[in-house]
Image (cartoon, rainbow, N blue to C red):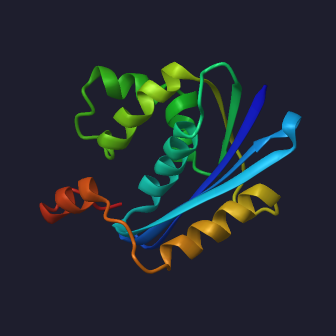
Amino acid sequence: MTINIYTDGACSGNPGKGGFGIVMEMPEKNYSKNFAQGFRLTTNNRMELLAVIVGLEQLKNGEEDVHVFTDSKYVSEAINKKWLQNWVKIGFKNKKNPDLWQRLIPLLKKHKVTFHWIKGHDGHIQNEICDKIAVKASQGENLETDDYFENANNGGLFQE
């Protein structure tokens, strides 16, 4: 079975209020589901990456062919150009978002994932939906706390 996961992140200010949006599709079953979440203080790259993580966390087993579609070169190139492998070797020294990358690694080992970069805001239907629900999530009430970012940011460690 094939599962397509379309993701996008949004941030009003960088850092600022942010959110992610996910569209998951199983074409063989004619199934689609959307997910979104907003955060009170985060960055766009964190939301792009968290969208991928949350999408993969929804999968029950590792037998599917999973295709992740993202408009984030930060995410797609970290995987496709094997930057992440190098970051692991250096213990993420001087790299941003190590908490999220470390959360992603076991998911990449569990699932057979192929990453695809798509151009954002280019009329791609699922990407446009992801963008819309990510922005809406970032503007919602009762926004979640991005604990790692907020705690690290209080020490002046993050700016994107």
Please indicate whether residue 7 sits to the left or right of residue 139 in the image: right
Residue 41 point in image, percent of width and height: 33, 69
Looking at the picture, does residue 128 appear above or below residue 102? below
**Nearer-the-camera pick, 102 or 57:** 57
Task: Name the image quarter holding the C terminus.
Answer: bottom left
Looking at the picture, does residue 112 appear above or below residue 75? above
Please indicate whether residue 44 sits to the left or right of residue 122 in the image: left
- Which quadrant of the figure has residue 102? top left
Residue 18 point in image, percent of width and height: 45, 68
Task: Name the image quarter holding the N terminus.
Answer: top right
Residue at horizontal 12%, vertical 60%?
A: 155
Residue 14 point in image, percent of width and height: 39, 69
Looking at the picture, does residue 95 appear above or below residue 114? below
Residue at horizontal 18%, vertical 59%?
A: 151
Residue at horizontal 43%, vertical 25%?
A: 106
Residue 64 point in image, percent of width and height: 70, 24
Number of dots carrying numbers:
0
Residue at horizontal 63%, vertical 68%?
A: 133
**Nearer-the-camera pick, 74 or 51:** 51
Q: Residue furthest left?
A: 155
